[in-house]
Amino acid sequence: MVVRHGVEVQLVYADSKLPVKEFEKNGKIYVEAEPDADYFIAIRRIGWEGDFCIISKCVVDGTRLRRVQSHLFYDGAIIYAGIPSRINGEVKTTALQFTRPRFTKGSRNTELGKVEVLLYQAILTNNSGSNCSDYSTSFQTSLDHASDAVTDALKKKFVRSKQGSTVITSRQSNNNSGFTISFGRGAFINKVTLNYCTALGLVHVGVLPKPPVWMLHRMKHPAPPGDCTAQFKKMKHPEKDKEIEYIDLTDEDVSEAFT
């Protein structure tokens, strides 16, 4: 998680609300993204010593999330930012999703995915009237990733974001209340930037150390579930009075499963 001026920002899994794994290097935050996983941008106010409201602007891979303004009035207030809509007075937020980009040949581009949250002091602009009409928003950004050499190994390293499938209901709105409070962006407070890609991508850019050869091989070529029928065997330790377990890699079934 990142905390700036009493506001905590992190990416969380849409189903569990648990944080996505993060790493820090040279003052930058990197998130280990899992392809096809839905996520929200969790923004929480903690320990802020001001009595004004804070609003945010979220930008994902260079595209702004429309109608996302987190009204953080009090300590502990939290919002799960995504793709909002309001239908029949019910406000819902659809998650974002990590996805594989479309690779095309061209000038080399190895930029990571990026989530930016800009924080502002809120200014009261209107305290009456009716502005509770239904709306819907969408999220679309370029999923292209250009490179001189499009290889299978490269395709496993990078991800981008698209609209996910998980939906949460954030609150109920009364269209007939005739009363609404509106805020505009005031003074800029700070910006939080979260860079994201797969574990292999983090290794590629030097955030994570290179794992042992066997682990790296399994990261690149995961074994299909249930394909490995290998069984541990036992043998007597050549020097100590005890048994040890091992897998016979000369077994035909085992060698196929581990390649």
Image (cartoon, helix red, strand yellow):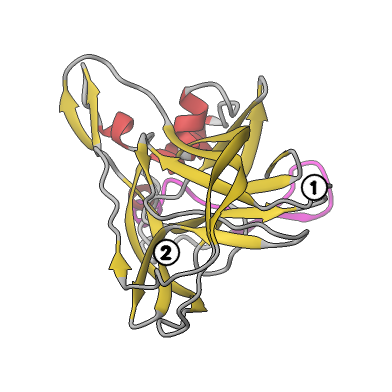
Residue for point 42% across, 30% down:
112
Q: Position of residue 138 (x, y in %)?
A: 28, 57
The kind of residue on which mark 1 rests is Gly
Above or below residue 10? Residue 178 is below
Picture residue at 57% right of the left edge, 31% below the top: 212
Q: Left or right? Give the position of 61 relative to 6.
A: left
Question: In the rendered structure, which segment of residues is drawn in magenta?
Answer: 233-254
Judged left or right of residue 177, residue 146 is left
Q: CA distance from mark 2 to mark 1?
A: 61 Å
Q: Quadrant of residue 166?
A: bottom left
- Residue 239 sits inside the magenta stretch: yes
> Residue 203 shows which numbered tag?
none
Mark closest to the chain's N terminus, 2 or 1: 1
Q: Which residue is mark 2?
A: 229
Dot 1 falls on a residue whose secondary structure is loop
Question: Which residue carries the number 1 mark?
Answer: 50
